[in-house]
């Protein structure tokens, strides 16, 4: 079965530290199986194009994975190279990256090969999604700008076990460090210094008083969240601290941000953004409904337009102007686990969904 074999081949290739071999495999497969224009860029993204038209639809995935558990690494092959373990049982494929998201990459590759597209069709497999969208950002900087994209992200918690829904929005994540500075002094003469911990706790109180924004999408409410997650400061029990810093994990929503900068209005307090993964929202209802129609035709269940709690490469694409939805093998509790797996039936419905949308979008104008 082509989808199973292709998924097994992709999953077996280690790609948590170095995605080169996996990217080379995808590039070689596309050159062998299609007549598309295939490129691999300087960071390892693989992009192929076929068809013509005024509007471009991209099937987007990533071939990097998170670090595997020991049980997910097979013994070295006859050439001495380590492979990831892949096991098929009870209608599922087990192994690191089966769900997130080499299975969906395989489904997208086959749909790309088999579809007779309505416009220009692109398939893209990026590097570095698990470490902040490195590949997607590079591709965008180099001019990657499809009009529409279906991102086949397989991360959990936006579909149920028996249905593959279409996510039209997701949260982002902004990670910040807030640093308070004071003046050191001996604790016996504390008034001679400025206590950075006191300034930091005042900033913590200000963060706690902020109201995270929320937005209603597809009948659901995406709620932002602010959480102080780490704090560090001081040098000795008898010294007034000159520095104290804490981190804030912020889950962002499309269109609005919490006003963390208010904490930096306090004397001696600085705010630094360490990571900012953008949220996503599809503003093109016709596109979302067309993808939903394709997903409905590919399964017996009744999929819905939903939202997703986690950031993906769709956030970077959406920020750059691409209308995005997410539709992939999302099953509760699978991605990033030590027994990660994906349903073969779910991969088949993803492949058929991708083929259908490629042949239906863009509609005749």
Image (cartoon, rainbow, N blue to C red):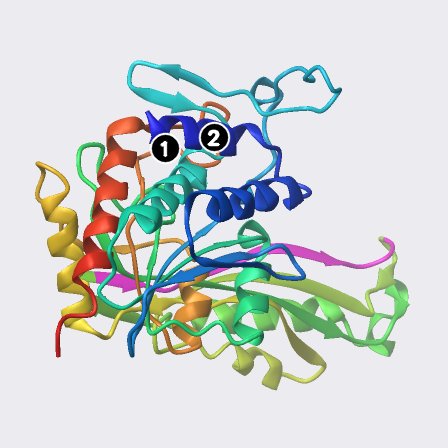
Which residue position is annotated with label 1? 333
Badges 1 and 2: C-beta atoms under 8 Å apart?
yes
Q: Nearer the viewer, residue 180 or 128?
A: 128
Determine the main secondary structure of the stretch shown in magenta: strand
Q: Nearer the viewer, residue 275 or 54?
A: 54
Tag 1: Cα neighbours inside 10 Å, few (<14), some, or many (≥20)? some
Q: Position of residue 360 (x, y in %)?
A: 16, 61
Magenta region includes residue 229: yes
Question: Is 85 positioned to the left or the right of 230 in the image?
Answer: left
Magenta region includes residue 295: no
The quadrant of the image that shows the N terminus is top left
* Residue visible at 70% across and 64% down in the picture: 245
Which residue position is annotated with label 2? 337
Q: Position of residue 292 (x, y in %)?
A: 15, 55
- Magenta residues, start to end: 221-236
**Quadrant of res 159:** top left
Q: CA distance from mark 1 to mark 2?
A: 7 Å
């Amino acid at each position: 079965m082509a989808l199973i074999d292709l998924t097994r081949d992709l999953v077996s290739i280690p790609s948590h530290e170095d995605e080169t071999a996996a990217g080379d495999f995808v590039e070689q497969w596309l050159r062998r199986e299609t007549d598309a224009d295939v490129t691999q860029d300087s960071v390892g993204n693989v992009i192929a194009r076929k068809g013509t038209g005024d509007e471009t639809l991209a099937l987007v995935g990533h071939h990097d994975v998170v670090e595997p558990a020991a049980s997910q690494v097979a013994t070295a092959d006859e050439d001495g190279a380590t492979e990831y373990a892949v096991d098929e049982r009870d209608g599922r494929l087990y192994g690191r990256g089966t769900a997130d998201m080499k299975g969906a990459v395989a489904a997208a590759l086959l749909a790309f090969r088999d579809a007779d597209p309505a416009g220009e069709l692109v398939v893209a497999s990026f590097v570095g999604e698990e470490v902040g969208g490195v590949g997607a950002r590079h591709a965008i900087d180099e001019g990657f700008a499809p009009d529409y994209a279906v991102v086949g992200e397989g991360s959990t918690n936006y579909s149920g076990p028996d249905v593959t829904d279409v996510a039209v929005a997701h949260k982002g994540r902004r990670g910040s460090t807030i640093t308070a500075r004071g003046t050191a002094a001996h604790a016996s003469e504390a008034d001679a210094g400025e206590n950075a911990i006191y300034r930091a706790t005042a900033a913590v109180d200000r963060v706690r008083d902020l109201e995270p924004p929320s937005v209603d999408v597809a009948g659901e409410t995406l709620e932002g969240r602010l959480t102080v997650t780490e704090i560090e400061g001081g040098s000795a029990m008898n010294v007034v601290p000159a520095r104290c810093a804490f981190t804030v994990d912020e889950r962002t929503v499309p269109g609005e941000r919490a006003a963390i900068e208010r904490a930096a209005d306090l004397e001696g307090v600085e705010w630094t953004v360490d990571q900012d993964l953008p949220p996503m929202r599809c503003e093109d209802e016709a596109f979302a409904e067309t993808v939903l129609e394709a997903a409905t035709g590919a399964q017996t269940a009744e999929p819905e337009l939903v939202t997703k709690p986690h950031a993906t490469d769709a956030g970077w694409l959406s920020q750059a102007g691409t209308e995005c939805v997410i539709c992939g093998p999302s099953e509760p509790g699978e991605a990033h686990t030590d027994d990660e797996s994906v349903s073969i039936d779910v991969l088949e419905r993803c492949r058929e969904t991708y083929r259908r949308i490629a042949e239906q979008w863009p509609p005749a104008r």
